[in-house]
């Protein structure tokens, strides 16, 4: 048995419990001063405070030097695996083209689909592995990753196998989501309904059979998939045993958030344009709001109504949305700044939004997302004294040391 002690923690700040936190609970964190954590074989065995130390001998001692320690961050929404990049879109954007204009002209997601289809498993694996290394160094210890740049059976399966291999071989825990309904592929141009039927008939059951995903996601958006098509896809996914996610109300409110609540989706993503009816439905359905503020920044849009969501009792999570188009940043620390400044969430609410709430929304709330006995010892020692500092400083990497399953990674 390997025993590790993390001592001399100035402040250990964490939400508690293995469930999503909503309303006033979103802002409830425990703060332990002069704390220490004892870890056995990657699992937290004991947490002490007030200068007391856990009993026993340790194989390794990590000195937190009086700094802030939080749970490892959880990025609950990424499009981690993709071919190519899309810097060529920026001049079009600056000249006034909208996100959907570029997509409708055959660019955007479809450009990445061409490049992803052209890449081998090995090429995609090595590129995505590089991204995971960057994320880990920034304090993210668990993430979700979506398919959705293959848009046919072979290439969607290829992407999901890359995600599976990354989860198995990389220190990061990576949770797979099938997102075959990310755009209408060129072969089905003008026939989105037929594409959804094909996904339901051929691809969803195959992904299930091969055990390659835990969640199914769909881009419910004007000129992509409408609410009726989304419902059909989600019903099939549920019937096959998947939990549901939906990209909803990113640009237009076409009923995505309302559908999310009605279908009791685990999470609805984006929600920049979500209205009262959609939010009420989500509160009713127990759906987490997976908010993506770096995408609002990058698309030069408004910010989702996070305070209203907290008021309505919707659990709020904040994620990166890392992808080659609307958010080519995997820096979850930047979303902490945006959550504080743009969503006007408190530092405690923000911490919940990047730890336990996304952990629950990707099915890992019982293992990660808080620092408590019997949970996985995933934690970050920050170059900061408190969460306020993390919310305030931006643009630097404030992660000092990263501990994953009790092992010092950085
Ligand atoms: O969540 N909105 C749809 N999907 C991604 C963007 C993907 C892309 O542009 O490549 C998102 O923002
Ligand atoms: Fe997304």
Image (cartoon, rainbow, N blue to C red):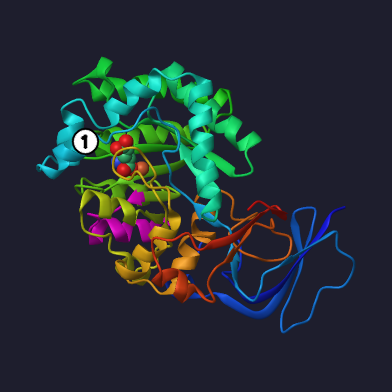
- Tell me if residue 351 is in the magenta stretch: no
Residue at position x 54%, y 74% in the image:
29
Residue 212's spot in the image, x, y percent? 55, 29
Residue at position x 33%, y 54% in the image:
294
Tell me where the magenta segment starts and ends, as one range: 269-286
The image quadrant in which ligand 2 is located: top left
Q: Quick check: 15 left or right of 350?
A: right
Residue at position x 42%, y 31% in the image:
236
Q: Residues within 10 Å of mark 1 (few under 14, many from 20)?
A: some
| Viewer can see residue 22 | no
Q: Secondary structure at mark 1?
A: helix
Residue at position x 29%, y 22% in the image:
185
Q: Quick check: 108 left or right of 216?
A: left
**Outermost residue toward the right in this view:** 57
Foreground residue, 285 or 87?
87
- Tell me if residue 278 is in the magenta stretch: yes
Residue 228's spot in the image, x, y percent? 26, 36
**Outermost residue toward the bottom in this view:** 50
Note whether 397 is above or below 264 in the view shown. Answer: below
Q: Which residue is mark 1?
A: 89
| Viewer can see residue 358 | yes
């Amino acid at each position: 048995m390997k025993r590790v002690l993390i001592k001399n923690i100035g402040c250990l700040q964490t939400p508690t419990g293995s469930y999503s936190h909503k309303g006033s609970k979103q802002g409830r964190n425990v703060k332990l001063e002069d704390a220490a954590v004892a870890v056995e074989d990657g699992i937290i065995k004991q947490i002490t405070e007030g200068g007391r130390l856990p009993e026993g001998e340790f194989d390794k001692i990590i000195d937190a030097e009086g700094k802030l320690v939080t749970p490892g961050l959880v990025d609950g929404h990424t499009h981690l695996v993709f071919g190519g990049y899309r810097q060529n879109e920026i001049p079009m954007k600056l000249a006034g083209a909208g996100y959907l204009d570029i997509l409708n002209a055959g660019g955007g997601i479809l450009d990445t689909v061409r490049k992803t289809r052209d890449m081998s498993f090995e090429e995609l694996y090595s590129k995505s592995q590089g991204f995971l290394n960057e994320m880990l160094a920034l304090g993210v210890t668990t993430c979700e990753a979506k398919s959705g740049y293959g848009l046919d059976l072979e290439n969607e399966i290829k992407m999901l196998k890359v995600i599976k291999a990354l989860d198995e071989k990389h220190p990061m825990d990576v949770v797979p989501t099938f997102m075959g309904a990310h755009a209408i592929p060129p072969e089905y141009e003008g026939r989105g309904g037929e594409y959804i039927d094909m996904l339901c008939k051929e691809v969803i059951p195959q992904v299930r059979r091969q055990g390659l995903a835990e969640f199914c996601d769909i881009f419910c958006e004007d000129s992509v998939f409408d609410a009726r098509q989304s419902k059909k896809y989600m019903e099939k996914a549920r019937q096959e045993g998947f939990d549901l996610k939906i990209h909803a109300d990113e640009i237009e409110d076409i009923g995505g958030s309302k559908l999310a609540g009605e279908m009791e989706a685990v999470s609805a993503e984006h929600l920049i344009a979500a209205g009262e009816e959609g939010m009420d439905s989500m509160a009713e359905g127990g759906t987490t709001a997976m908010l993506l503020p770096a995408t609002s920044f990058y698309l030069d849009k408004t910010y989702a109504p996070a305070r209203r969501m907290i008021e309505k009792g919707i659990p709020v999570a904040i994620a990166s949305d890392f992808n080659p188009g609307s958010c080519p940043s995997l820096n979850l620390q930047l979303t902490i700044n945006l959550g504080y400044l743009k969503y006007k969430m408190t530092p405690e609410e923000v911490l919940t939004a990047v730890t336990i709430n996304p952990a629950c929304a990707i099915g890992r709330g019982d293992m990660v997302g808080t620092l408590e006995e019997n949970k996985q010892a995933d934690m970050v020692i920050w170059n900061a004294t408190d969460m306020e500092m993390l919310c305030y400083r931006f643009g630097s990497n404030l992660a000092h040391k990263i501990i994953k399953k009790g092992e010092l990674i950085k």
